[in-house]
Image: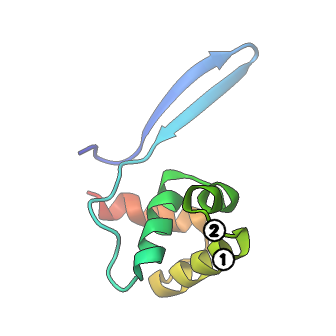
C-alpha cells in the first residue's frame, strides 16, 4: 500500500498539470450503510455526485443525500476533509 497521496507533475503546453493518486483505504469506516460504503469509495476516488449517480444507476439527488449522511456520520464538512481522513486512515 502507498503511504499517503502521490503527486505527479506533467507539462501540457503552458500549463503544469498535477495528478494526485489517493491510496484506496482497506475498508470504509464503520457505521455506514452498504449504499453509503459504495458511495464513500467513489467519493474517495474523486468522483463527482453526477459520476457516482451514473456509476450506481441512481439519481443525483439520492447521491447528494447519501453524501450528506456520510459527512454527518464521519464528522467531516466536505470532500477534501473526507479524502484527507481516508488518506490518514489508510496509513
In the visual, does 43 lie left or right of 59?
left
Say which mark, if any, is on residue 62. 1
Q: Taking 54 as reference, is 64 above or below it?
A: below
Question: Depth check: 83 or 36 in front?
Answer: 36
Question: Is 29 situated left or right of 84 in this image?
Answer: left
**Residue matched to label 2:** 58
The x, y position of residue 17, in whole percent, is 63, 27
Q: Quadrant of the C terminus?
A: bottom left
**x, y percentage for residue 42?**
50, 58
Q: Nearer the viewer, mark 2 or mark 1?
A: 2
Disc marking residue 39: none
- Tell me the SS state at disc 1: helix
Residue 12 shown left or right of residue 9 in the figure: right
Residue contact at pointers 2 and 1, CB within 8 angstroms: yes
> In the image shown, does 59 or 74 lie closer to the viewer?
59
Mark-to-mark CA distance, 2 and 1: 7 Å
| In this view, 5 is above or below 52 | above
Q: Name the side, left or right, on which 38 lies relative to 77.
A: left
How many residues crowd around disc 2 within 10 Å: few (fewer than 14), some, or many (20 or more)? Answer: few
Q: Residue at x 46, y 61 (%)?
A: 84
Q: Residue at x 40, y 45 (%)?
A: 5
Q: Residues within 10 Å of mark 1 (few under 14, many from 20)?
A: few
- Identify the secondary structure beneath mark 2: loop
Whether 6 is drawn above or below 47: the answer is above
Amino acid at each position: 500500500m502507498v503511504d499517503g497521496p502521490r503527486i505527479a507533475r506533467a507539462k501540457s503546453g503552458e500549463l503544469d498539470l498535477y495528478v494526485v493518486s489517493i491510496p484506496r483505504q482497506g475498508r470504509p469506516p464503520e457505521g455506514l450503510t452498504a449504499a453509503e460504503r459504495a458511495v464513500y469509495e467513489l467519493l474517495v476516488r474523486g468522483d463527482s455526485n453526477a459520476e457516482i449517480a451514473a456509476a450506481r444507476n441512481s439519481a443525483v439527488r439520492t447521491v447528494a443525500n447519501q453524501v450528506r449522511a456520510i459527512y454527518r456520520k464521519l464528522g467531516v464538512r466536505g470532500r477534501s476533509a473526507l479524502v484527507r481522513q481516508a488518506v490518514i486512515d489508510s496509513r
